[in-house]
């Protein structure tokens, strides 16, 4: 019996010592991660410090909007934006993107600066820091929560603004630009499909081949298409003036049937025929749609335009 108790207490002592070593090891890992975290935080821009101290303003659209309104008011700039104010929403969305990128960079820097195995650290050999150690670290958990909150709110703002501008675009132009078909789909053999009267076709990557009294012949400007399918063209009815090789990107057409003309070899050739929509993407201000259709980035002075137009000083 005495021998049993001796063995029992020996095992208990070993388990206790192992637990103590593991506990110390966990503290050393946390210390290493936290020290690296704090050194990285010092590299943050000043505006991001607030985020680490108080993330309550990134919990909802209203809290974020009110937060920035209060920041402007401290500079004697007073503004009362509506949720449908896309300029204001873009400022909020852009700021969230900046904050997200700054914090995500911190996360990456911490992981990059800590090698997988650290030798002779605080008297403990062969410390291996794993993904699990990051996930258990309180600073890392807090950092990831902030990243998740920022992304969630940014996605909410983007989705709302995208759908709002989509409906505005459809109301003014009668179609959804993201639902259009590339005209090259009906111009070349390897992906040829018969056009339909329901679809709207995007003339990106096409140019004018030849002008006629009734309209223009059009070809694909993709080098691959020109080399492999040099004679695959379409016709567009128009009374507007075009020049040979004029780029048609930004314009859209609808299918109206077929058109027959004489080729340079004096043979009849029949191609699909289209007509222009009364719309040209190139004529839309780059600051008109900040979220939809996302084909043009806002100009650098869009924020200045916003303040000049909307802010009451």
Image (cartoon, rainbow, N blue to C red):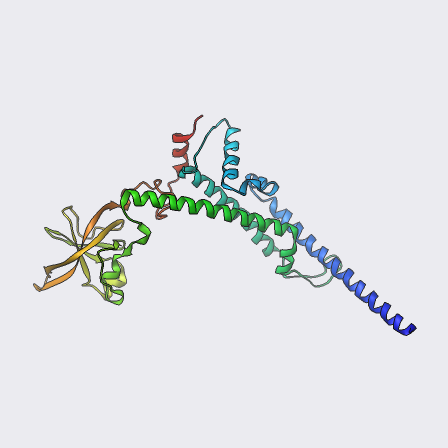
Residue reaching furthest left? 266
- Report whether 5 appears left or right of 232: right
The picture places residue 100, in percent across and down from the top left corner, at: 52, 47
The picture places residue 45, in percent across and down from the top left corner, at: 55, 41
The picture places residue 298, in percent across and down from the top left corner, at: 38, 42
Q: Is residue 239 above or below residue 70?
A: below
Quarter occupied by the N terminus: bottom right
- Report whether 223 appears left or right of 93: left
Closest to the observer, 101 or 23: 23
* Residue found 25% across the figure and 53% down from its top: 200
The picture places residue 168, in percent across and down from the top left corner, at: 33, 42
Q: Is residue 302 above or below residue 261?
A: above
- Report whether 207 appears left or right of 148: left
Visible residue check, residue 72: yes
Q: How many marks?
A: 0
* Residue found 31% across the figure and 50% down from its top: 177
Visible residue check, residue 301: no
Quarter occupied by the C terminus: top left
The image quarter in which residue 180 lies: bottom left
The image quarter in which residue 123 lies: bottom right
Q: Is residue 68 above or below residue 185?
A: above
Closest to the observer, 285 or 118: 285
Q: Is residue 229 above or below residue 29?
A: below
């Amino acid at each position: 019996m005495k021998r049993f108790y001796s063995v029992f207490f020996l095992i208990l002592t070993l388990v206790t010592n192992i637990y103590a070593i593991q506990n110390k090891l966990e503290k050393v890992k946390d210390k290493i991660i936290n020290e690296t975290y704090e050194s990285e935080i010092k590299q943050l821009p000043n505006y991001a410090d607030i985020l680490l101290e108080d993330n309550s303003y990134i919990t909802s659209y209203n809290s974020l909007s009110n937060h920035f309104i209060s920041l402007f008011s401290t500079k004697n700039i007073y503004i009362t934006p509506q949720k449908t104010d896309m300029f204001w929403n873009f400022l909020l969305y852009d700021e969230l993107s900046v904050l997200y990128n700054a914090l995500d960079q911190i996360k990456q820097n911490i992981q990059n600066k800590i090698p997988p195995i650290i030798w002779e650290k605080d008297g403990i050999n062969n410390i291996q820091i794993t993904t699990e150690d990051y996930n258990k670290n309180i600073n890392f958990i807090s950092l990831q929560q902030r990243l998740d909150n920022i992304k969630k709110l940014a996605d909410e703002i983007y989705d709302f603004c995208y759908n709002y501008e989509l409906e505005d675009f459809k109301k003014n132009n009668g179609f959804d630009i993201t639902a259009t078909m590339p005209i090259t789909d009906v111009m070349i053999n390897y992906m040829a499909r018969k056009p339909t009267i329901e679809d709207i076709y995007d003339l990106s990557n096409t140019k004018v081949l030849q002008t006629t009294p009734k309209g223009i012949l059009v070809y694909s400007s993709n080098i691959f298409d020109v080399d492999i399918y040099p004679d695959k063209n379409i016709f567009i009815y128009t009374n507007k003036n075009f020049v040979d090789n004029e780029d048609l990107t930004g314009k859209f057409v609808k299918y109206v049937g077929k058109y027959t003309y004489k080729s340079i070899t004096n043979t009849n050739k029949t191609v699909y025929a289209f007509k222009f929509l009364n719309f040209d993407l190139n004529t839309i201000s780059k600051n008109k749609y900040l979220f939809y259709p996302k084909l043009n980035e806002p100009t650098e002075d869009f924020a200045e335009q916003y303040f000049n137009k909307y802010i009451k000083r």
